Image (cartoon, rainbow, N blue to C red):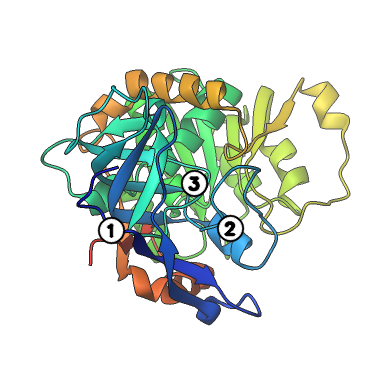
Amino acid sequence: MSENLPQTMNAIAIGEGGAPESLYLAARDLPKPQAGEILVRLGAAGVNRGDCMQRIGLYPPPPGAPDIMGLEFAGTVVARGDNADKWQIGDRVAALVAGGAYAEYACVHQDHALAVPDNMSFTDAAALPETIFTVFANVFEGGALQKGETLLVHGGSSGIGTTAIQMAKHFGAKVIITAGSDDKCAACRDFGADLTVNYQSQDFVDACRDFTNGAGVNVILDMVGGDYIARNMEAAAMGGRIVNIAYMQGFSAEVNFLPVMLKRLTLTGSTLRARPLAEKTRLTEAVNKAFWPHIGAAVKPIVDSVYPLAEAGKAHAHMESSHHIGKIILDCSS
């Protein structure tokens, strides 16, 4: 550790009750990079639904992860642990982590960091790791999306949704999204969506059937759950793949599974946070090769708003209002 680094740092702690306003700034010991790890002075951190779930006690960090919230960040390498020689002091990196990003400093394994282009701000870079990793792992690996196929994304105006649109279009797929307002639908068309469905006034099953001339969609990325589980089966094409990454409307549903047999559907899902180190390394290498070279060009960060680290509670309240389009970011630099 460098002698110029402080002994403590500011980080966000969770107070009693679990409401957004319970979050507060607290002094914490500076994390020490272990073997193979780098210490990063954070410029910005992304806000995610998983953080809100952790705040209310429903998404605890996996064993060995920091208890501080925050799953993605961008910043500058300031120290290295033993055998961590992949990055130099002063390098600009972004990373997906299991926790610790709501702070001024955080550690990450050197193999899980990605280079931030010189012309990209930390605010923009912090908007990318969680969304790109999630879309790559679930749409391109779990869902096996192919060029020319049709992807349906529920929550198209979310951080994951806006990134999924761009990644799928760059790959040569057609994209349908659902969103809850005409303004959100218009924004998603600007991001490249071929068809937008306002779920407040339209039925996405009918819209998908019409768009595909009755064939149905090939891959569905769903973070809604609830009654969408059965409706996704209706919207899916023969051999369709349905991937769940969250269940905002509930984990349970009464479902007729006959379409799974008749259409030969694949139902799957995943999380990233608790995956083993080796699997995260493999995924980082795959993302770095397939999509990271295109950030800022074919895949642009879509930033809705930026809050100071001390106002993490306001950022959570904004996320839970669902009024945002794209990513909500914390400025960790001040």
Q: Residue at x 51, y 27 (%)?
A: 280
Separation of disc 2 and disc 1 at Cα? 55 Å
Give the SS element for disc 1: loop
Q: Dots 2 and 1: beta carbons under 8 Å?
A: no
Q: Dots 3 and 2: beta carbons under 8 Å?
A: no
The answer to which image quadrant residue 52 occupies is bottom right
Q: Residue at x 58, y 30 (%)?
A: 219
Q: Residues within 10 Å of mark 3 (few under 14, many from 20)?
A: many
Give the SS element for disc 3: strand
Give left or right: position of 216 versus 176: right
Separation of disc 3 and disc 2 at Cα? 12 Å
Q: Residue 6 shows which numbered tag?
A: 1
Residue 292's place in the image compared with 55, above or below, is above
Percent position of residue 107, x then y: 40, 43
Percent position of residue 155, x then y: 52, 52
Percent position of residue 108, x then y: 41, 38
Which mark is nearer the camera, 1 or 3?
Answer: 1
Q: Dots 1 and 3: beta carbons under 8 Å?
A: no
Q: Earlier in the sequence, mark 1 or mark 3?
A: 1
Q: Nearer the viewer, residue 294 or 311?
A: 311
Q: Quadrant of the N terminus?
A: top left
Q: Residue 177 shows which numbered tag?
A: 3
Which mark is nearer the camera, 3 or 2?
Answer: 3
The answer to which image quadrant residue 232 occupies is top right
Q: Quadrant of the C terminus?
A: bottom left
Separation of disc 1 and disc 3 at Cα? 46 Å
Give the SS element for disc 2: loop
Q: Look at mark 2 in the image and give the residue it sits on.
A: 202
Q: Residue at x 70, y 31 (%)?
A: 268
Residue 241's place in the image compared with 176, above or below, is above
Which amino acid type is marked by label 2? Gln
